[in-house]
Amino acid sequence: MTTNVIEDVPLINLVGPPNSGKTTIFNLLSGKNLKTVNYPGSTVEYTTSNLQAKYKIKAELLDTPGIISLIPNSLDEEVSVKSLYSHPKLGSPHLVINTVDASQLSRHLLLTLQLIESGFKVIVVLTMNDILRKKNINVSIEKLSKELNCDVVKINGRSGKGIESLISAIENNLMEISEKGKPVIKLYNLSSAKTNLIDYYKRIENIIDKVYEPIPSEGGVNVEKANKELNVINAPDAKAKNRPDELTLKVDRILLHKYWGLTIFVLIMGATFTSIFWLADPLMVLIDRLFSNLSSLTYATFGQDWFSSLIADGIISGMGSVLIFIPQIIILFLILGILEDSGYLARGAMLIDKPLSKIGLNGRSFVPMLSGFACAIPAIMAARTIPNRRERLLTIFIVPLMSCSARLPVYALLIAFLTPLDKPWIGGIMLATIYILSTVISIIVAAIIHRMRKKIIKEEDNSSFILELPTYKRPKLSTMLINTYSNTKQYVVRAGPIIFVFSIVLWFLTYFPNVNPQIEKTNLSKNEITRLETSTRLETSYAAAIGKVIQPVMRPLGMDWRIGVSLLSTFAAREVFVSSLALIFRVTNTDADLQKSLLSSMRKATISETGEKLFTPATIMGLIVFFIFALQCISTLAISRKETGSWRIPMLQLVIFTSLAYVMTFITVNGLRFIGIN
């Protein structure tokens, strides 16, 4: 049924193929700076917003995952198609804004024709017009509007030029709807659509012949040359068919080369993680000194009592030992943002599709796996874009093996223990090696499960991988900065409360019940008395009692109860490991920086029963190996349960990865000791 007036607030749906500039248009209309990505399937959830107040249009704007037609091939495409016909909360749209890449009309107009035939009121927004201009080609919006019988506007996504024309078209269409009524939408006939694709593309070819026109150049128009550049489906010259941007073609000849492509990919990833370790060092030193001075100020102000210890040892040291790694996290997200917005990450998915296919995955798994370097939670959710259920579950299973940003503080501390002060580049190489190793391990695990898939997931293999490569673009600085800020803020907000609570709990466990330990103070300096009291209090604390219960488990690894307690605390959040060590070793040294003090305490620590060094190159390498394998994150288990629909896979992840971590740590520590590295 139709209505005579627009009830309440009209709904405008934004739809379009992946990489067509849809989210950029959403940002221009809403004023929000949402993430613009260069690979399909990034936006899985609904996103809504009002239009900016300056446009004086009262309407609800809905952004949905990218689709190439009204025939869904994955979960995220199904979300978009269903929302078109009847959003569960907002209903069907009054108006549809369809983004179309002007250089890809031969493919993108399929969705446009389907929308119009289904009865939707459509405005076509042409993007990527600059790519056509480089070829001296133009799309006539007047002719295209006549062919489609709907409004067509051009917009420059980078500068926003043309947004006024879109606002005017929205106003006119909403006015028409208010007068004539909301359009009647009919369900798209999927069965007949699949058999009529050839007819659709013949119609599209006919439209393209009419709307593409060459741009006059100096000396007149070279019609023959212009025709060769046209994006015609059945062009006589096969090389001219769907021909992309020339610059993109030239760059891809190198970056997608059979051999050089993978080599360059590995080098780029290596440079990324080396930069994380190297460039962040000066900022980390500043933050380190700040928290060290705060601890010193606390003791100077309140004296040496339990309250001072709570503030300095519990809160300041606990938070400082994690916040010190914020510079590294910022650099990580900035570099990934550059690679993503430039279009290179889509190439990464293409490069590793063939290797991934050998282990039961495909290129779509690359996005969740890469997202796992930031956090396993959104990475697992990103696996929704994988249409094949077996591949989706397998991807979810291995994502926790990717070294997330929560592990970064742990790796940075342990690597700093092994790295000479005058050779920080060694630390960068070690960090890059860790990340590469975690990827290789996840691939090996996936390969093993792929071999056993009939026993684990009984499902036929009907996988396919189709990826549209975007043209290379200059990353937009403002978008990258906002995304980096958002991701870093999420890291702090997620980790901060957990660390605060656990810092207080761990402080209590390490300070009580022996608040005033009785020691022999004869011929001891004030500093020596303080250190002896701290040591005695710790050895008789609740934490020591808990740790000694798990001491037999830690002893084969060359570790003691103190490391055991720190590892247990990481089930709340992996980054708590650093603050736990700082608390257990009472790192509030007023004469040195916080991280240097912690490293100094680690180098001096001994196992009480044997007098041997607690932290050695062998045990440090063992801890690194442990964190590469172990799944120590309750939040990851929860989201895995939600996405898989049962506790089976989360429990398998917990048991298998934790057991594997223990066994590999045992092999690493004792293997290194056997060859004399201790």
Image: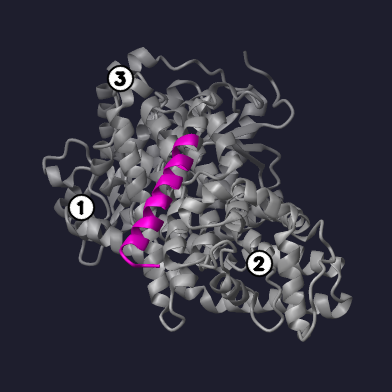
- Out of 50 and 374, give the one closest to the viewer: 374
Q: Estimate the spatial distance between the alpha carbons at disc 3 and disc 1, rounded to whole Å.
A: 48 Å
Tell me the residue that label 2 is attached to. Answer: 585
**Disc number for residue 226:** 1
Q: How many marks?
A: 3
**Disc number for residue 244:** none
How many neighbours does mark 2 have within 10 angstroms: few (below 14), some (14-19), or many (20 or more)?
Answer: many
Q: Estimate the spatial distance between the alpha carbons at disc 3 and disc 2, rounded to whole Å.
A: 54 Å
How many neighbours does mark 1 have within 10 angstroms: few (below 14), some (14-19), or many (20 or more)?
Answer: some
Q: Is residue 672 left or right of residue 659?
A: left
Residue at disc 2, secondary structure = loop
**Residue type (three-letter) at the residue carrying disc 2:** Phe
* The quadrant where residue 197 appears: top left
Q: Residue at x 36, y 37 (%)?
A: 108
Image position, residue 504 (x, y; %): 77, 56
Q: Can see residue 574?
A: yes
* The quadrant where residue 207 appears: top left
Q: Residue at x 36, y 68 (%)?
A: 429
Q: Residue at x 19, y 48 (%)?
A: 227
Q: Earlier in the sequence, mark 3 or mark 1?
A: 1
Please state the extent of the stretch shown in magenta in the rendering. Answer: 655-678
User: Is residue 674 a member of the stretch shown in magenta?
Assistant: yes
**Residue type (three-letter) at the residue carrying disc 1:** Ala
Residue at disc 1, secondary structure = helix
Q: Residue at x 33, y 32 (%)?
A: 449
Q: Estimate the spatial distance between the alpha carbons at disc 1 and disc 2, rounded to whole Å.
A: 73 Å
Image position, residue 14 (x, y; %): 53, 37
**Residue type (three-letter) at the residue carrying disc 3:** Glu
Q: Earlier in the sequence, mark 1 or mark 2?
A: 1
Tell me the residue that label 3 is attached to. Answer: 460
Q: Nearer the viewer, mark 1 or mark 2?
A: 2
